Amino acid sequence: MAFAPQIRIPATYMRGGTSKGVFFRLQDLPESAQRPGAARDMLLLRVIGSPDAYGKQIDGMGAATSSTSKAVILSKSTRPGHDVDYLFGQVSIDSPFVDWSGNCGNLSAAVGPFAIASGLIARERIPEDGTCTVRIWQANIGKTIVAHVPIARGQVQETGDFELDGVTFPAAEVPLEFLDPADECDGGGAMFPTGRVVDDLEVPGVGTFRATLINAGIPTIFLNARDIGYTGTELQGDINEDKAALARFETIRAWGAVKMGLITDVAEAATRQHTPKVAFVAPPADYVASSGKAVQAGDVDLLVRALSMGKLHHAMMGTAAVAIGTAAAVPGTLVNLAVGGGTRNAVRFGHPSGLLRVGAEARQDNGQWTVTKALMSRSARVLMEGWVRVPG
């Protein structure tokens, strides 16, 4: 019996923030995968090593966590005022499914560097030393991201002294601006899809919880930690080793998605795993991060823990950080109340790996809150470049 040989595709394996993913230029993909559809999804699943019944992704580039089971496709943008179009795929680990419903804020930090290094930015735009500003069209959610990429000797500067909790080694800082981050197309058509900053979320079989439902950065359901039996100081093992807790969170996520208008029936949540996210907040408290670092209550404005793809995240998703900063800027949300209320344009929050600062510029027009910009810094680095191989 004859077997088709493997095919090889130009690719770059990159870390962006606290995530890793395989990056492609659209033009380098096989012709059948240059269009959305089953061929593209099947290719990316095989690249990452999914679906894997063992949950390890041994036969692919994934590393068996939601933070490392990701793919990015970039192309030159035809949209005025933008340099590149950025498409993100969250690859399921144990099922044959690629979720295109949201962005990855962490990998957004690697988009600018990849675009520059792979020839998608005109050479004359790149200074010998300084900063190259890359305007990115996030195609999943239809939003603009501006990346400020450091340049040294005409090349992307990757090394530096910027430290990011959740990443072991320092690197060069990449400041990001998420413009108009509230998603006005998804869900109920506004930053707060129900029109309220706090709702009573009824979850049959689980309970009724106070919740802030927000479309900003990524659709997110915020809960009070104490209402669900937590303190906000939990680490991954406290949640991820409790199957009953994970099942409750998934039920909450499904019913929250219905209330946000993202799906019409809870059964649809299984086909929309990437969004919405569930996060819980608490006032500041001392705790020890997963690295052993002591986090003092006086160093943070609040505590946040968030789940991604059914598990507690080891740090914080970049898009969820945008949602945190946005919600903190709007008086009366659960995030804002955990901070202590009032008006905020930046917050420092504690997550399982340490601390993160995120800013947001919010204003109220005719009784409606809008956020013009969210800001945070990440870092990015090429881990490997060349070709990825998949069976033909």
Image (cartoon, grey):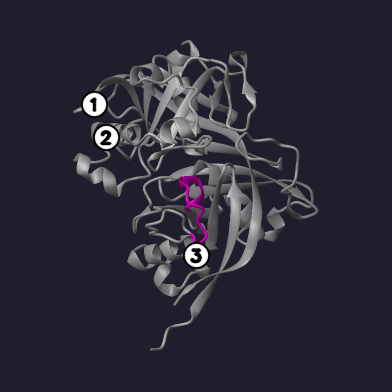
Determine the residue positioned at 46% across, 58% down: 57
Asked which secondary structure carries label 3, the reply is: helix
Whether residue 336 appears in this view of the structure is yes
Amino acid beneath label 2: Thr
Name the disc covering residue 206, or none.
Answer: 1
**Bounds of the magenta span?**
58-69
Q: Which residue is mark 2?
A: 251
Amino acid beneath label 1: Val
Of residues 146 and 222, which is closer to you in this image?
222
**The N terminus sits in image quarter:** bottom left
Gap in angstroms between the C-alphas marked 2 and 1: 8 Å
**The C terminus sits in image quarter:** bottom left
The main secondary structure of the magenta stretch is: loop
Establish if 286 lies above or below 127.
above
Q: Horizontally, is 302 left or right of 125 in the view?
A: left
**Which of the two marks, 3 or 1, is nearer to us in this view?**
1
Q: Kindly indicate whether the residue at mark 1 contacts the one at mark 2 (C-beta within 8 angstroms).
A: yes
Q: Quadrant of residue 288?
A: top right
Q: Badge 1: few (under 14), some or many (20 or more) residues near its Cα, within 10 Å?
A: few
Asked which secondary structure carries label 2, the reply is: helix
Determine the residue positioned at 53% across, 50% down: 82
Q: Position of residue 121 (x, y in %)?
A: 63, 57
Q: Horizontally, is 42 left or right of 373 in the view?
A: left
Amino acid beneath label 3: Leu
First reached walking from the N terminus: tag 3 or tag 2: 3
Establish if 109 lies above or below 281.
below
Q: Badge 3: few (under 14), some or many (20 or more) residues near its Cα, within 10 Å?
A: some
Gap in angstroms between the C-alphas marked 3 and 2: 36 Å
Q: Horizontally, is 154 left or right of 114 in the view?
A: right
